[in-house]
Amino acid sequence: MAAKAAKKSEATGTEAVEGGRPRLLLMDGHSMAYRAFFALPVENFTTATGQPTNAIYGFASMLANTLRDEAPTHFAVAFDVSRKTWRSEEFPDYKANRSKTPDEFRGQVELIGEMLDAMHVKRFAVEGFEADDVIATLATQATAQGFEVSIVTGDRDSFQLVTDDVTVLYPTKGVSELTRFTPEKVQEKYGLTPAQYPDFAALRGDPSDNLPGIPGVGEKTAAKWINQFGSFAELVERAEEVKGKAGQNFRDHLEAVKLNRVLTEMVRDVELPCGPAELVREAYDRKALTVFLEALEIRNQGLRERLLAADPGAEEAGDAGPAPAEVEIDGTVAGAGELAPWLAEHGGKLLGVSTVDTWTVGSGSVAEVALATAEGPAVWFDPTELDEADERAFAAWSADPASHKVMHNVKGLMRVFGEHGWSIDGVTMDTALAAYLVKPGRRSFALDALSVEYLGRDLAPAAEGDGQLAFGADDRAQADALMNQARTVLDLGAAMTTKLDEVGAAELLRDLELPTSVLLARMERAGIAADRGWLERIEQQFAAAVQQAVQEAHAAAGHEFNLGSPKQLQEVLFGELGLPKTKKTKTGYTTDADALAWLAAQTENELPVIMLRHREQSKLRTTVEGLIKTIAADGRIHTTFNQTVAATGRLSSTEPNLQNIPVRTDEGRAIRRGFVVGEGYESLLTADYSQIELRVMAHLSEDEGLIEAFTSGEDLHTTVASQVFSVDKSEVDPEMRRKIKAMSYGLAYGLSAFGLSQQLGIQPDEARRLMDNFFERFGGVRDYLQDVVDKARATGYTETIMGRRRYLPDLNSDNRQRREMAERMALNAPIQGTAADIVKVAMLRVDEALRAAELSSRMLLQVHDEIVVEVAPGERAQVDELVRREMAGAVELRAPLDVSVGYGGDWESAAH
């Protein structure tokens, strides 16, 4: 593959193509990026750091399809430099009517440029000229040199370039559908030849460019005049012959139209650094492209495959598959009786482990397993084919702490192996967790992406079809792929060891994340018992509430409509009922929850209130339906805990997402009643920290006043409120306390004065005064919050007390939106990250203490800051003392940790 790519990169001009003419593809980058921006909703394409990516995603998709369909041998993209060009000098009002570039679009063109650089695509941007002029110049040069040319642009003026050798691909539906304009198509569409198009455009005018038209003269009249007189020049020469009012209007606007004609003509001799022959396509930097897509959280596998399929460095033209891994594997497909001898020879070495997982709760199903050494020997086996000696040998090796292993997602493998009766010990590296600690902001830790980024190696798929391989079969592609994957895990582990040392996170992986992963695997296998009957009853109650809200909404509107249709709801609220307009969007006026709450506060109309209730009850019903579906055959819900989702280090859960269950509402408490103590156990224990974020903030800021407020033993928010409002503690009313509580927690989450005003329903000025008064009393907090942002801006990252880093490159971005988002993250990350680390330490201490005391009680859940333990009969007092002691002693803070504990037969009853 490398030799073929080199051959292509060295080729220039027509010799780059065997058996045909060279094909040049030219693209107007700004034009297509802008259309892509409006083709996809920005709210659906935004990274965790707040970077919009809709234009990038749409452009990349269009690019992949176009490269596939056009199969160019040469390719370049042209961009505008600024609105100041020779046209704006000739006509100062040129494009002056265009609206301000949306903030969400800013920065995306620059990022598209980075993507093109990773694809080794030549980019042009020439001061004083538009992208159209660059394209016209290259197209003119290319046809003279024997090229076929395709131009992708959203500017109709490009139709003047169309010839038998030049085709324009014009977007007619977003950027997903491009219409091919040939000379025949231009003639069919406008009744003119491409050469006549600028004459026609001059008469028609162009509102998008602020070029004035002629009153009363539309496209049909313009085309008729050009056909009648043959050309614009002839029309001007014989202007007096044009009859009627339209003719007089033409003569009255003649000077403006003549200027239009100058401006619509594309320049074909722009001085460029290189010509068409030097635009031959080169092999991608696949690593850089993968890293780029990963950094922007563009995880659509289909898009990635289409982009890579168009790589001219691929081994076969149009090959969508990845390149093979560049390692030597001495692979063995182990049948019955062959695994034990292999382990006897190689089991003492550091091994990489990989599996194909078909695990489901209680199924006992484990697909293939592969092991690999750094020296080359590797083995593949199907667990169902092992004989007794193989089974014993593998179980012993897997559980041996002295047999060191490298895995990718050890928790998932423990869950898989545990279903087969195997335990795992001796794991020295989890490459997924390591990559998370190195770059916690990324949203995917797939092995193939990490392999490309850190090893420069593409992975072949590890399984196809039903995932089975017949022993003795000649086709070993699947087994080889899985062994190759195990070797990649091993090699990636070595690379990640270096990276962890660079960021000071080796101990964090070894002492915190890996042990937590092992604990979470046991918790997932244990699950928590569920009362199906109770959950089904409240699901019916929520369903009835949803239907009631539908009926009330129809009554309020005076007719039936689809409550789930934003368009129909907009028509009812703003059209029929005439309610105040909310924020304008592309599809009308927004009807999101914030908008409905605002309407409810601004008007006396009942429909916004009904709609809010409908959405709330619908969400609750969906939550309960999801819980019922996840009850396994053992009557328990086995959620999956995620360690690599939240960049702050907090755990989350899926299938089901237990964080979706409201904590402080009656409905949420009703749902939590459906989680019950299991058979053979006495009760559930819940334990969490009181105000852990604020205690961490007090510790990090070293503010003596805030620390004293915690250690006084009095109500924190009342104590703080008395100082902020300068009143005696006895005079602090509930509203004062509410404001201080919201603000205190808001500071820990990077809340702005505007955000606080929205949360409390007060004016921004009042929120600012509230924050100023707080900072006047607690100057240490003010100084800490300022210092943490300044330090992060200098170093590029924040850090928890345990060394967990959060990288925030956007702190120095020239994009205000991205910079402010990064500043909020910088305020939030050390506090939230430290709290997350403390909870993990507490979990490990509690679990270790339970096991050391040989108790049967076990940890089941960790949700938010809460730990749920299933208590065995007769162990309550011992477990209570143990949990309080270990959680309180997790770390030593200046504002000491305070633990609350509760018991009950269900999760809600155990609340405290």
Image: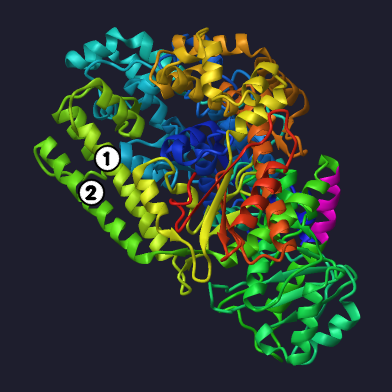
- Vertical placement of 321 versus 242: above or below? below
The span shown in magenta is 491-501
Point 75% across, 80% down: residue: 380
Residue 760 in view in this figure: yes
Q: Residues within 10 Å of mark 1 (few under 14, many from 20)?
A: some
| Tag 2 near tag 1, CB within 8 Å | yes
Residue 16 in view in this figure: no
Q: Which amino acid does label 1 sit on?
A: Arg
Q: How crowded is mark 2: few (under 14 residues within 10 Å), some or many (20 or more)?
A: some
* Residue 416 placement (x, y as % from top left): 64, 71
Q: Distance between the residues labelled 2 and 1?
A: 9 Å
* Residue 753 placement (x, y as % from top left): 50, 17
- Vertical placement of 674 versus 338: above or below? above
Secondary structure of the residue carrying numbered label 2: helix
Nearest the eye: 582 or 222: 582
Q: Is residue 495 magenta?
A: yes
Point 34% across, 15% down: residue: 212
- Residue that badge 1 annotates: 613
Residue 545, numbered label? 2
> Closer to the N terminus: mark 2 or mark 1?
2
